[in-house]
């Protein structure tokens, strides 16, 4: 997750200045939300509370992935950066999905 956050901060430094308070700000917040909600959920002891934080983290990942796609379509990102960012996001998604499913099974 940390690698994805650093990737987003690095690539958004080169975005047009008029995007600073729109897509740049939103993408950075969404990306930080992924890792921060995961950390907070991991620190909780109750499975249901953990699940809530992990699901919020997963929702932020989906938001971030759309902004990755949008940024590529707007030509703010080159295809190489887009592919790398998508790979990182997919890895995070798989990890979160596994955690969420495991917690859901434990709550049944």
Image (cartoon, rainbow, N blue to C red):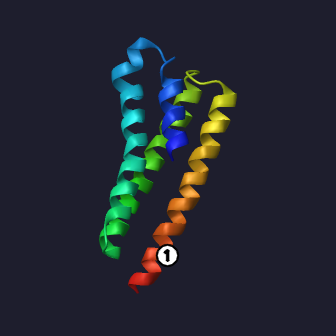
| Residue 23, position as x, y percentages in the image | 41, 28
Above-or-below relation of 55 to 75: below
Q: Can residue 59 be seen in this snapshot?
A: yes
Quadrant of the frame with the C terminus: bottom left
What secondary structure is marked by label 1? helix
**Residue pushed farthest top?**
17
Query: Measuring 38% from the left and 55% from the top, which residue is drawn there?
Result: 39
Label 1: how many residues lie within 10 Å, few (<14), some (14-19) or many (20+)?
A: few
Above-or-below relation of 87 to 10: below
Q: Is residue 99 left or right of residue 45?
A: right
Q: Can residue 65 be seen in this snapshot?
A: no
| Residue 32, position as x, y percentages in the image | 39, 41
* Between 9 and 101, the one nearer to me in the picture: 9
| Residue 53, position as x, y percentages in the image | 34, 61
Query: Measuring 30% from the left and 75% from the top, which residue is drawn there?
Result: 46
**Residue pushed farthest bottom?**
108
Query: Measuring 39% from the left and 14% from the top, which residue is drawn there?
Result: 18
Above-or-below relation of 36 to 17: below
**Residue pushed farthest right?**
80
User: Which image quadrant for residue 49?
Assistant: bottom left
User: Which image quadrant for residue 94?
Assistant: bottom right
* Between 2 and 18, the one nearer to me in the picture: 2
Above-or-below relation of 50 to 13: below
Query: Measuring 55% from the left and 53% from the top, which residue is drawn there?
Result: 92
Q: Give the residue pinned by disc 1.
A: 102
Total labels drawn: 1
User: Which image quadrant for residue 88?
Assistant: top right
């Amino acid at each position: 997750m940390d690698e994805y956050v650093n990737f987003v901060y690095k690539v958004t430094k080169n975005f047009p200045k008029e995007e600073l308070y729109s897509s740049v700000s939103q993408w950075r917040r969404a990306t930080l939300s992924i890792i921060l909600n995961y950390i907070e959920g991991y620190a909780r002891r109750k499975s249901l509370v953990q699940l809530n934080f992990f699901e919020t983290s997963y929702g932020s990942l989906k938001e971030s992935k759309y902004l990755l796609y949008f940024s590529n379509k707007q030509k703010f990102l080159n295809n190489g950066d887009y592919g790398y960012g998508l790979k990182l996001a997919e890895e995070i998604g798989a990890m979160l999905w596994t955690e969420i499913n495991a917690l859901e099974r434990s709550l049944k």
